Image: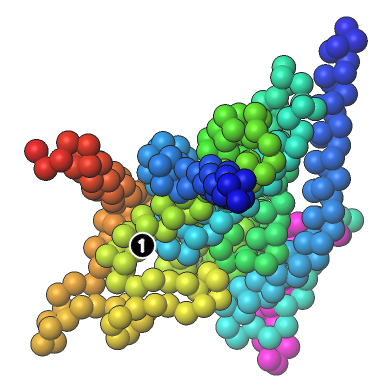
Amino acid sequence: MKKDLIIALKLGSICLVAVLLLSIVNLFTDKKIKLSNQLKMEAANKELFADGVTFKKNHFNKNNELSDEFYFEVYNSTQKMIGYITLINGTGFGGEIALLIAFEKNLKIKNIKLLKNSETPGFGKKWENQKSMDMFVNTNTDDKPFPIKKSMVSPEFLNTPDGVTGATITFNGITEAVARAISLMKQL
Amino acid sequence: MDNVIIQENKSNSLFKKNILYFTNGLLKENPALILLLGMCPTLAVTTKVANGIGMGLATTFVLLFSNLLISLLRNFIPTKVRIPSYIVIIASFVTTIDLLMQAYLPLLTNSLGVFLPLIVVNCIILGRAEAFAGKNTAGKSILDALGMGLGFTFALILISLLREFPGTLKIDFSDFGLGILTFLKNADNPTLSIFRFNIYSGAKIFTMPAGAFFILGLILAFKQNIENKKKYGDK
């Protein structure tokens, strides 16, 4: 009994030291990581909406300002609102993914960008390439619904070497997240 | 007079003995090419030389600090719970390097993806902890970690060099904030051409997963050939 207690205490003390070490490292790197994520987001916003000038950040739930899912209202140089950019989280093959989705005013999808992800290099990572998102562009209208399943994707996108083949789970993760974003945007 | 010479010989052999702990990992027991440990990152991330360097150095960092700590604590850690203790120590250092890389090399973190946190379960690190650091002094463990880590880095660089260059005809260091190295014009899409005929613009198979197996297999065959010649002569 006493022996087991000593073993538990020793293991506990190792864990405690590990926690201390990690909190110190976090203290140093947290600001820097947040800053680099923010810069990435700003650059991505500009990339998705080239004619956007002001991006006004809003939360879906006004009471939850800390939520990591939110949207920007995009204004052009004459202060006219031209669309939205939504940040949404989902689950890919390697864990959490974050997507930026640019909508036009009528919620037609203008473009999608895969931000944070831990997908497999050579497979799921390919979705970082803007070209693979082409299959979603200009969908979510009355005559062109958003392709939530692989079978709904136009065949011309499936035969490209960088198509969905080999990264189905990432594809499903992306479409599920986008469908959720669409329903959230419709509620606004 | 005789005494001095003996002492010199002694220190010389001590140095020789210690350097063996270092070179052991570099060549004789190279973790990736001889022991065939850590095959998952070896095959998966070596699509780019930059990935190979990043992954190798990250592994070396974790190996160095976990070996050092485990060898210092080897009399403190109870034998019954040594594996959980090793994993806690290794996981803390992996998280440390993960956070540091996210902060200072965000592009490299992106391209290494899930394999960076997966260093925790890299069998080289747990293997060295169990086989070496848990039984030897701190100094020897550091030498062993450096040798093993640099040997792994060397193997990753070798494989990724043989994959990236034939695959794309360029070596992309943009993840480190540096340029792209190529011997041909048009750095974005280099093509080998003679008299305006495009002959070769890189074979994609090398950067695909299959290419990793091909290249690793060729390297192992080449190594085996040399060893066999040493052993049996030219027969």
Mark 1 lies on a secondary structure that is helix
Is B37 displayed left or right of B126 in the figure?
left
Residue furthest to the bottom in view is: A78
Is A48 displayed left or right of B198 in the figure?
right
The residue shown at (27%, 65%) is B166
Q: Judge whether A83 appears above or below B217 on screen.
A: below
Residue B46, given in percent of the width and then of the height, sits at: 41, 55
The residue shown at (20%, 78%) is B192
Amino acid type at image mark 1: Leu
Is residue B96 visible in this depiction of the protein?
Answer: yes
Is residue B41 visible in this depiction of the protein?
Answer: no
Q: Nearer the viewer, residue A51 or A140?
A: A51
Residue A22, given in percent of the width and then of the height, sits at: 80, 48
Q: Nearer the viewer, residue A148 or A165?
A: A165
Residue A188, given in percent of the width and then of the height, sits at: 74, 61
Residue B91: image quadrant is top right
Which stretch appears magenta?
A: A65-82
Residue B225, given in percent of the width and then of the height, sits at: 20, 43
User: Which residue lies under the disc numbered 1?
Assistant: B161
Tell which subunit mark 1 falls on: B
Q: How is the image coloured?
A: rainbow
As for residue A40 lying within the magenta part, the answer is no
